[in-house]
Image: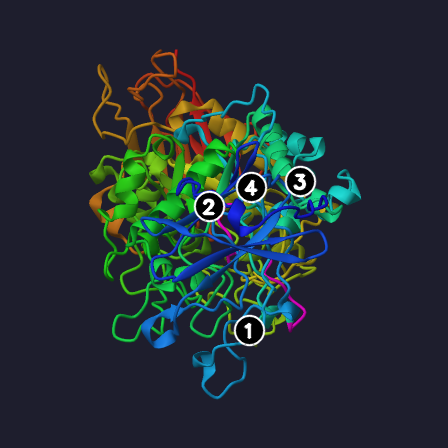
Amino acid sequence: MRGTPALQGVAEFLVHPGEPYPLGATWDGEGVNFAIYSENATRVEVCLFDADGRETRVPLREQTAFVWHGYLPGLQPGQRYGYRVHGPYDPDRGLRFNPNVVLLDPYARALDSTEHFDRGVFAYELGHENEDHAMLQQDQRGVPLGVVIDNAFDWGRDRWPNTPLHETVIYEAHVKGMTMLHPDVPEELRGTYAGLAHPAMIQYLRKLGVTSVELMPVHAHLDDPFLLDKGLTNYWGYSTLNFFSPELRYSAAYRKGDAVGAIAEFKEMVKAMHAAGLEVILDVVYNHTSEGNHMGPTLSFKGIDNPTYYRLVPDNPRFYFDYTGTGNTLNVRHPQTLQLIMDSLRYWVLAMHVDGFRFDLASTLARGLHEVDQLSGFFTIIHQDPVLSHVKLIAEPWDVGEGGYQVGNFPVRWAEWNGIYRDSIRAFWKGEGGLASDLGYRLTGSSDLYQGDGRKPSASINFITAHDGFTLRDTVSYNDKHNEANQENNQDGHNDNRSWNCGAEGPTDDEEVNRLRARQQRNLLATLLLSQGTPMLLAGDEFGRTQHGNNNAYCQDNEISWFDWSAVDDRLLEFTRRLIRIRKGHPALHRQKFFSGRPIRGSDVHDVMWFRHDGEQMTDEDWQNPHTQSLAMFLAGNGLRETDRQGRPLHDDHLLLMLSSSHEDLEFTLPDLHGCRQWEVVVDTSDDEAAESHAPGEKTLLMARSLKLFRCPLE
């Protein structure tokens, strides 16, 4: 990083009262205002470090509504700082103050480094017989320091793309994994924000056709000691250390010694994405932090005001509620913790120009006392916020606590990862019967989950695969997980993957198995991109990326997770690009409203209709038949009852989507419907070159385990 200015003339008598807001370290051109919240502290010192690591401690004597604050004239951007917070060390009362530990400012906009475990990050004596009751007396300086910044940046003509959700195609990606092995990205930029912004990557994303890149966590995170001891790292980054500063591990500037440069580098990446019409959505982790349980490190929140920031067990506040499986849960019932989250979200929108957020384990944020509550303070605040109510808000609608699975229960303005969609579509193409009714709901936007509360089909974030689980190629190549590289005896990761290896476990030379796997990948991709709702594509699935059966690669910062650009399945990639073009070109495939089921004026055609392979409409018996493995969905092109952004009525071709997970070939009769004279094939997952056309009433052969999409141009 740039050299920290020497501390000259800073002394206690030069400290002005300053202001309690904004929280954090704010440079105004003449000095820096420091403000930090702690209800239970008895004394707070801001610790200033010069370029040689020498420390100057400055007490903050002013306190307003539990905010300790002071203004130091003369300080400049680049100044490194931390806090020492005094108060009782009494874990049994939930109080863990220890001024021997230098703490990171929760509102730090930049960090000077990653963590240094060798310099100490614990507030108690490790290995002591009294465990965390034994307060440590030695100085601990292992946490990264905050850095005062000048937030100025030339955004030029940057504009948020504001892609409507129903027109959105999401691409879930990892900053590092996408570019580490890309031959067209300069080596010094690989694995970084600058690498992702490189023209080669922007061109790839644009040609693919996605509209929004959803980045796995980019907030500063901790590499857990138990992983480092195994020679592994926290590759996914779901262990947040700070909610304002970008992760330095993904910064080309940091590699050159400029930690603060990571901020401008991130902004340049967003700016480049926006210039290409691409949105940037962040996967954010506000449900827990990297400080773990009562035996975890003291890095920031725990030592500043433990009861404010964490959910403690009322009868024994030494311990933490753990709805996240990570040891702690943020206390979103406390106004200050809610303010922290809201300030962070607004900062990433207003200062960093991101377009939305995907909330990890979002059910945790909705918990009141224990149960998940749609009317919780978190949702209420976001609903009325003038900034956040207009960006994309996506929930991972579950956590690991009781009653945490809340798919379909989030409020208006929220979209959700539809885990039911994933499970249903995987099960159908695996060959399970009795799924016709469920399949009908998933193909049409999951009205059973979202229509009743005023939301639209786009509220359903449809996905087949995500970072957590098998890749698409592995879903059709493995029956079982193979996580041995994680060094947890293959005990980690999901066991219920609803995957099918098509007859051989893992790589095989069997041409028949490989042909079936290729078709199954096309079936799953086509279903995803031809369903109502908002599709999310796991990065790399479009060209057959494999993790070799590892369905929990959270700790694999290596070739298991990195994209192998030398092994791209060009046929699958082009197929995916074509599917996205088809989706974008047909408004009937991304409707703004749910189907009404009513007939179109002047005809007996309904806006959606369902057919058996013999051309007859589906009956109640067909929907409930446990042996039903095929159906056809008709979408009326003149039944949209919607307008485009200019207010013009939308029309489309009639579309007919046929799906069969049967192991036998089937003859499908093409329906004879009003206004339709000729059915033309658009997609055939068994034949990329298919160019058939049929008159209504004629038959088409649907190969075993395949999908076809037909169009009928309206006159």
Q: Nearer the viewer, mark 1 or mark 2?
A: 2
Q: Nearer the viewer, mark 2 or mark 3?
A: 2
Residue placed under numbered mark 2 in the picture = 70
How many angstroms separate mark 2 from mark 3 (CA)?
27 Å
- Answer whether labels 1 and 4 touch (C-beta < 8 Å): no
Which region shows up in magenta?
229-244
**How many other residues sit within 10 Å of disc 3, few (<14), some (14-19) or many (≥20)?**
many
Between disc 2 and disc 4, whose residue precedes?
A: 2
Question: What residue sits 64% from the left and 73% below the top?
Answer: 229
**How many other residues sit within 10 Å of disc 4, few (<14), some (14-19) or many (≥20)?**
many
- Answer whether labels 1 and 3 touch (C-beta < 8 Å): no
Left or right: residue 599 compared with residue 539: left
Q: Amino acid at mark 4?
A: Ser
**How many other residues sit within 10 Å of disc 1, few (<14), some (14-19) or many (≥20)?**
some
Residue placed under numbered mark 1 in the picture = 490
Q: Amino acid at mark 2?
A: Gly
Residue 261, disc: 3
Residue placed under numbered mark 4 in the picture = 686
In the rendered image, residue 302, in percent from the top left (x then y), is placed at 43, 64
How many angstroms separate mark 2 from mark 4 (CA)?
69 Å
How many angstroms separate mark 1 from mark 3 (CA)?
40 Å
Q: Residue furthest front?
A: 13
